[in-house]
Amino acid sequence: MEISGKLKLILAEETFASGFNKRSFVIAIEDRYPYDVCFDLLKEKVAMIDNFQIGENLKVSFDVKSREYNGKWFTGCTAWKIDRAGGSVDSGSNGGGYQQAGPPPISAGDIDRMSGPADEDKDDLPF
């Protein structure tokens, strides 16, 4: 998923006893009803946010995951790529290899082109 907004807050990095580390940041979304979204950066990706300043417009690529703990559900947004809203890629510009490419979106037309003609007699499988 992707969302764009203005960088509002960068929180300090947290390191846990297990050696796991994370860092969170918040972007403000300007909409009819403005709201804020907090994202987590995990492990080696915590440095990705260092390239940005408070007030910059960002485009964040992220995953949403939920997990259950003691009968309660918790949902988090984990960022895996951050760009300036103008489209220049900065999340991996420090040479750290932070940028990961997500799968491209697929439309119904793409599926039709990939499936090809419906020729049931044609068997081109290699096995």
Image (spheres, rainbow, N blue to C red):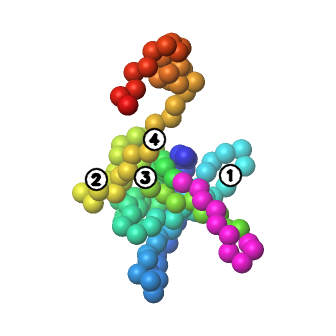
Residue annotated with mark 4: 103
Query: Which part of the image, by quadrant, shows the C terminus?
Result: top left
What kind of residue is marked 2? Ser
Residue 77 located left or right of residue 91: right
Q: Earlier in the sequence, mark 4 or mark 3?
A: 3
Q: For the view shown, which residue lies furthest in the right direction? A: 71
Which amino acid type is marked by label 1?
A: Pro
**Which mark is nearer the camera, 4 or 3?**
4
Whether 28 is drawn above or below 50: the answer is above
Mark 2 vs mark 4: which is more N-terminal?
2
Find disc 2 in the rendering and name its residue: 93
Q: CA distance from mark 4 to mark 3?
A: 16 Å
* Mark-to-mark CA distance, 1 and 4: 29 Å
Q: Nearer the viewer, mark 2 or mark 1?
A: 2
Majority secondary structure in the magenta region: strand
Residue extending farthest to the left is 95
- At x 46%, y 78%, the residue is 14
Mark before the other along the chain sequence, 1 or 3: 1
Residue 106 lies, in percent from the top left, at 52, 31
Q: Residues within 10 Å of mark 2 (few under 14, many from 20)?
A: few
Earlier residue among tags 2 and 1: 1
Instruction: Find the distance from the CA under tag 1 to the CA under tag 3.
Output: 21 Å
Q: Is residue 54 visible?
A: yes
The image position of residue 37, as x and y in percent, is 61, 58
Q: Of residues 65 and 53, which is closer to you in this image?
A: 65
Residue wearing tag 1: 34
Discs 2, 4 touching: Cβ within 8 Å? no
Q: Amino acid at mark 3?
A: Ile
